[in-house]
Amino acid sequence: MVGVGSDTSEVLFDELAREYNRDVRHRNRRRHEKRPRRLASWWATGPSPIRTKAGCRPIERPNGSSPGIAALAQRQVLPDGRPCIDFARSLAPRSPGAPANSVFLPFALDGLTWAANAGSAAPSSLTVAQLKAIIEWTSTRWDQVGGTSGETIQPFLPERGPGLLGLLNHLAGVERIGPCVQTVQQDQGTDPKLRRNPNALVFYSIGKYLAQTVYHQADVHGKLELGRIDGAKPTVLNRATGRIEINVGQVPGVATFPEIFRVLEYVVVLSDGDGRIDPALERLFVGAGSWLCADAEAREGVQDHGFLLLAPDRCGRPE
């Protein structure tokens, strides 16, 4: 069972695949079953094209949520009936252009905030209105948004998929993307466009930033530091769990990070003509009792990659 798509959860899915495949080996040794279906996941970046499974035609590597969902929808099916792609990883919720037979299955809570390099002219906090103005390019200098210089801000967004503007509109009311906004690989502060750039401003997954900086999972954050929004910190030390977590108001006395900047991490699968999902994928991803939502090691893996667990009645619930 092979997945492609968003970079935000790609490192997590490497660990999930190791855990799941180890569990499968143990189960099948007990049951003497042959050829168990294993879990695998392709990163968003790397050499391209890729051959997702043996016998499949090479395709351009899907880099991001929207390309991953598009590749899932256009997947090749092998003569024995096996699809060449089984699921997509997505940070974005369903958009109007999503395939009609796609099923979005949330499995973790994430958040987005802005980031700039340490020592830059950026202020420590930006308002939602200021972020909107930066992306729409109606505020172009740091001193227009509380920064310490008159240098021009260089905003960066990930490659523009069809759902990006809708997501930005939901987060900050963005109605258009300004003409000087550049593109960059998501969640990668070591990108040459960002490294040592004192005027860069990017959006970053809070969960992936924690995975990189706190849990040391494939750390490529470079010198980027997460910024506050409306004065609220994106992360908080939760002494009840002993973890640094996405700030959702779990610590009394600490201002809650704006709710509109919370996002869900999804697995996207396809249903057949009768609305049914492949039973193996259903056991893996669908509902509170699925492996991803209920297995103790899978849940710990989600947390060790910076994300927050969803309530049982929310995890794996089809959208």
Image (tube, rainbow, N blue to C red):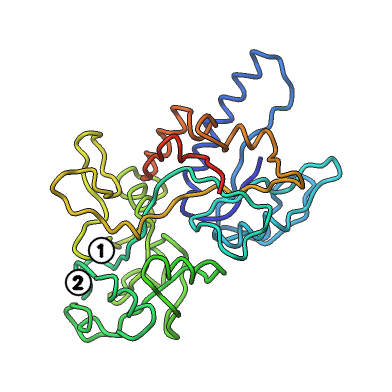
Residue 88: give x, y in percent of width and height: 60, 51
Residue 53: give x, y in percent of width and height: 72, 45
Query: Image check: 288 left or right of 115?
Result: right
- Tell me how many marks there are: 2
Graded by Cα atoms within 10 Å as few (under 14), some (14 to 19) or many (20 or more), the crowding at tag 2 reads some
Residue 311: give x, y in percent of width and height: 40, 37
Mark 1 or mark 2: which comes first in sequence? 2
The residue at which mark 1 appears reads as: 227
Disc 2 marks a residue whose amino acid type is Pro
Q: Residue at horizontal 66%, vertical 19%? A: 28
Q: Marks 1 and 2, Cα distance to the nearest angstrom? A: 8 Å
Query: Image check: 62 left or right of 256?
Result: right
The residue at which mark 2 appears reads as: 123
Label 2 residue SS:
loop
Image: 255 above or below 39:
below
Residue 33: give x, y in percent of width and height: 72, 19
